[in-house]
Image: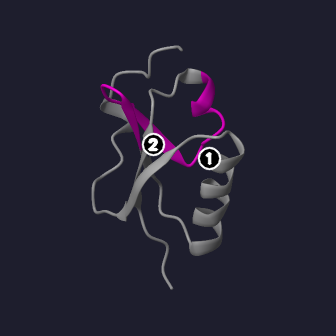
Amino acid sequence: MFPKRYTIVVEGRLGQRFAAAFPSASLVAEQSRTRLLTEPLDQSQLHGLLERLRSFAIELISIQETDEPDTRADQAPVPRR
């Protein structure tokens, strides 16, 4: 199975301190949610990322496979929380 890119939506606006906790993802803060756009992940890496969300007690809203490109270089930084 080839690695895939995912968009994971979580409840709340994750601040900059969480960016270091999820190095395989770009964090995009929205009104009351945050989207994590992942680098290509295999199944074990995806499960590890989901486990990390659970360990921080971050509420998962949705996860889906995506073709959305990683826009780390052109996005505004995530605001500090």
Magenta includes 61? no
Magenta includes 29? yes
Residue 33 image point, x, y percent: 38, 34
Task: Give residue 73's quadrant in the image.
Answer: top left
- What residue is drawn where x is 44% and y is 69%? 4
Task: Give residue 63's quadrant in the image.
Answer: bottom left
Q: Amino acid at mark 1?
A: Leu
In the figure, 24 relative to 67: above or below? above
Mark 1–mark 2 contact, CB under 8 Å? yes
Q: Report the span colored magenta.
A: 17-35
Left or right of residue 46: residue 74: left
In the figure, 1 relative to 69: above or below? below
Query: Mark 1, residues whose alpha carbon is within 10 Å: few (<14), some, or many (≥20)?
Result: some
Query: Mark 2, residues whose alpha carbon is within 10 Å: few (<14), some, or many (≥20)?
Result: many
Q: Amino acid at mark 2?
A: Val
Image quadrant for the C terminus?
top right
For marks 1 and 2, give the CA distance. 9 Å
Read off the residue under disc 2: 10
Mark on residue 53? 1
Residue 17 image point, x, y percent: 62, 24
Left or right of residue 12: residue 57: right
Q: Nearer the viewer, residue 35 or 71?
A: 35
Q: Which secondary structure lies at badge 2?
A: strand
